Amino acid sequence: MALQAILARVRAAEALAGRGLGSVHLIAVSKVQPDARVRDVLIAGHRLFGENYVQEAQAKWPGFRAEFDAVQVHMIGPLQTNKAKLAVELFDAIHTVDRASLADKLAKLAQARGACPQMFVQVNTGAEPQKAGVLPAALDGFIADCRAMDLSLAGLMCIPPEGEDAGPHFAALAGMAARNGLTGLSMGMSGDFEAAIAAGATHVRVGSAIFGARSYG
Ligand SMILES: *Cc1c(COP(=O)(O)O)cnc(C)c1O
């Protein structure tokens, strides 16, 4: 298990970028990983995890939360509106707010509960047709709509196009967050989290580099 090595690289990248020690949150992306691997990372003391699927998280995390204290789980996969209620109950943050119907549902659920997970807006920085996320040109209006619904936002999230230099996408996302007064930046995965930290990431989402390759049954 490579957790300690990845944590050391996160801390080194923070230092190199002149960022505060511990200012970057390492989200260990545990989707599709065997429970034994997740348990090893919990036993090693890590407490922040990411999941892509509501049902998988529902099966996995109530048990681990009962066994280990202070566990936090972030939703980083696409969220169907009809799973929003479950998601608000299961997750400490949702990184994939990407459309008005979902934002509206989440805002109403938050009001009814009197509590809300941290919300990140997913931005489709590469304007890829097959990819989720608000298009950059529509982002400022979307953020204003969320705020008008009283949905408080923690930041922005992106998944740059595969096979492209991620750096310009990270820089663009940081600019979009700054001009909208948002401080959270969820960006960077196993292959590029150091570049993301250099560009200002506050949350990096690292799966295979910590847990090993995923095997989809
Ligand atoms: C799976 C996934 C990750 C982790 O990817 P790795 O390349 O294994 O680090 C990060 N972000 C999102 C949105 C993912 O779906």
Image (cartoon, rainbow, N blue to C red):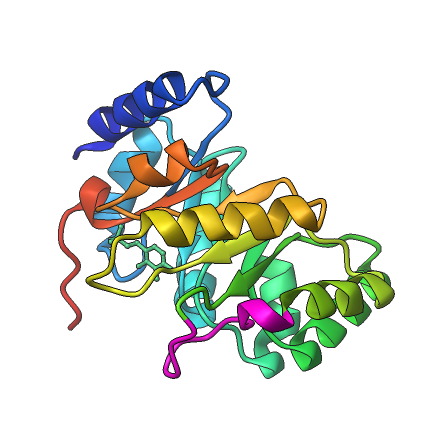
Residue range of the region highlighted in magenta in the rendering: 127-138
Spot occupied by residue 67 in the image (x, y as percentages of width and height): 44, 39
The quadrant in which residue 31 appears is bottom left
Of residues 130 and 205, the one nearer the viewer is 130
Is residue 203 visible in the rendered image? The answer is yes
Residue 127 lies, in percent from the top left, at 43, 74
User: Residue 112's x, y, as percent?
Assistant: 85, 65
Which residue is drawn at the image coordinates 61% and 48% (left, top)?
A: 177
Residue at the image point whose x is 38% and y is 60% from the top = 159
* Left or right: 75, with 144 as reference point: left
Please check the rendered image and state whether residue 129 is part of the magenta-colored stretch, yes or no: yes
The answer to if 57 sits in the magenta stretch is: no
Name the residue nearer the viewer: 109 or 209: 209
Quadrant location, the N terminus: top left
Q: Is residue 102 above or below residue 198?
A: below
Q: Residue at x 32, y 38 (%)?
A: 195
Residue closest to the eye, 164 or 89: 164
Whether residue 15 is situated above or below residue 132 in the rendered picture: above
> Which residue occupies the foreground of this view, 19 or 102?
19
Location of residue 158 in the rendering, given as x and y in whole percent from the top left corner = 45, 58
User: In which quarter of the view is residue 142 placed?
Assistant: bottom right
Report whether 63 appears left or right of 10: right
Kindly report the secondary structure that dominates the magenta region of the rendered protein: loop
Is residue 92 in view?
no
- Residue at x-position 84% and y-position 55%: 114
